[in-house]
Image (cartoon, rainbow, N blue to C red):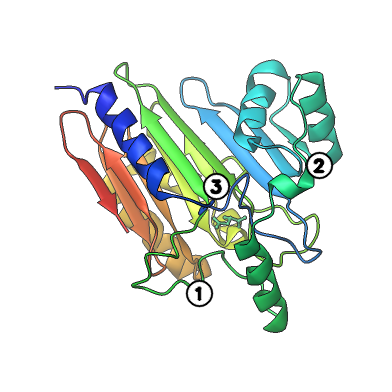
């Protein structure tokens, strides 16, 4: 039995009512770079034909993943960055959001702390294991429809105190996301440099393509590879071509959940 749509909607409303401030590291609530500025990355990929769109180092865009989708559908390119992406946004009729829209007191305090400690860090590096207050993170979404089409999307503000102009894995096809109807859809979160060097999302897809693994086996193999090769810190969510879902991480926590058709919602903190 398919999950009734209204159930998902109800849960969304419930969730929205308990969140009184931005808690995720994307769009409004993104982390700040070394200059105290927001620079966001996002990408989307369609597993039917491997089309993809990405934007990197953008500011003043309220929903960067929507702009990434327009790059995929309305341009002949895969990635646009910085001023070029902003110019394209204007061409598509997207109004820039004022700088103050993105800033939250939590992120300002987090940057101050990172500067004080001379650290570049994940937005939830310091999360207290038991704190209900610290549920931050990059946003990733993966999906499979009833025809077996797969898609993936990732959106982030990056890492705290990053250098100006630094682009992470999130907008890079094969690193921060991947989707191929023949294998799986993957979205990743963690220290982008390690995810780029290990091309982790494509590596997981390759485990399925070349070794006939399912989502769980490929995720396990991918996390082992990430750890062994680059001591990668972060995690992935995966859905395979048959609809099996899996997740893996090397950090303390990664908030995620899924609904398999006919199954119960799984939520993990
Ligand atoms: N992967 C993102 C980046 O390196 C950060 C994150 O996922 O938290 O930009």
Q: Is residue 267 above or below residue 184?
A: below
Q: Which mark is residue 126?
A: 1
Relative placement, left or right, of 155 versus 93 is left
What whole-number distance in Å separates the C-alpha atoms at marks 2 and 3?
A: 18 Å
Q: Is residue 6 above or below residue 200?
A: above
Q: Which mark is residue 176?
A: 3
Question: Which residue: 43% across, 42% down?
Answer: 186
Select label 2 or label 3 by which is in front: 2
Image quadrant in which the C terminus is located: bottom left
Contact? badges 1 and 2 (CB < 8 Å): no
Residue 72 rendering spot, x and y as whole percentages: 64, 23
For the residue pair 260 and 104, the one nearer the viewer reads as 104
Select label 3 or label 1 by which is in front: 1
* Residue 240 visible, this orientation: yes
Find residue 17 and report its image quarter.
top left
Residue 155 rendering spot, x and y as whole percentages: 57, 43
Q: Circle 2 sits on which residue? A: 82
**Disc with the residue nearer the chain's start (2 vs 3):** 2
Select label 1 or label 2 by which is in front: 1
Can you tell me whether the CB of the residue at mark 2 lies under 8 Å from the nearest atom of ligand 1?
no
Find residue 206 and report its image quarter.
top left
Can you tell me whether the CB of the residue at mark 3 lies under 8 Å from the nearest atom of ligand 1?
yes
């Amino acid at each position: 039995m398919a999950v009734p749509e209204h159930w998902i909607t109800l849960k969304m409303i419930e969730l929205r009512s308990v969140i009184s401030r931005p808690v995720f590291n994307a769009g409004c609530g993104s982390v700040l770079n070394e200059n105290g500025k927001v620079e966001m990355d996002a990408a989307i990929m369609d597993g039917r034909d491997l089309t993809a769109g990405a934007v990197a180092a953008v500011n003043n865009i309220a929903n960067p993943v929507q702009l990434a989708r327009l790059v995929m559908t309305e341009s002949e390119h895969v990635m646009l960055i910085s001023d070029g992406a902003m110019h394209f946004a204007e061409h598509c009729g997207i109004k820039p959001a004022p700088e103050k829209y993105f800033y939250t007191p939590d992120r300002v305090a987090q940057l101050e702390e990172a500067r004080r400690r001379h650290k570049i860090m994940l937005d939830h590096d310091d999360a207290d294991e038991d704190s209900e207050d610290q549920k931050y993170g990059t946003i990733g979404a993966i999906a499979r429809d009833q025809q077996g089409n797969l898609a993936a999307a990732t959106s982030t503000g990056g890492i705290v105190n990053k250098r100006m102009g630094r682009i992470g894995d999130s907008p890079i096809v094969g690193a921060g996301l991947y989707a191929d109807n023949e294998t799986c859809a993957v979205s990743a979160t963690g220290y982008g440099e390690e995810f780029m060097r290990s091309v982790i999302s494509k590596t997981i897809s390759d485990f399925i393509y070349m070794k006939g693994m399912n989502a769980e086996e490929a995720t396990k193999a991918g996390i082992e590879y990430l750890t062994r090769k680059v001591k990668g810190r972060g995690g992935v969510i995966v859905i395979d071509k048959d609809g099996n879902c899996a997740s893996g991480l090397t950090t303390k926590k990664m908030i995620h959940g899924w609904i398999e058709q006919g199954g119960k919602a799984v939520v993990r903190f």
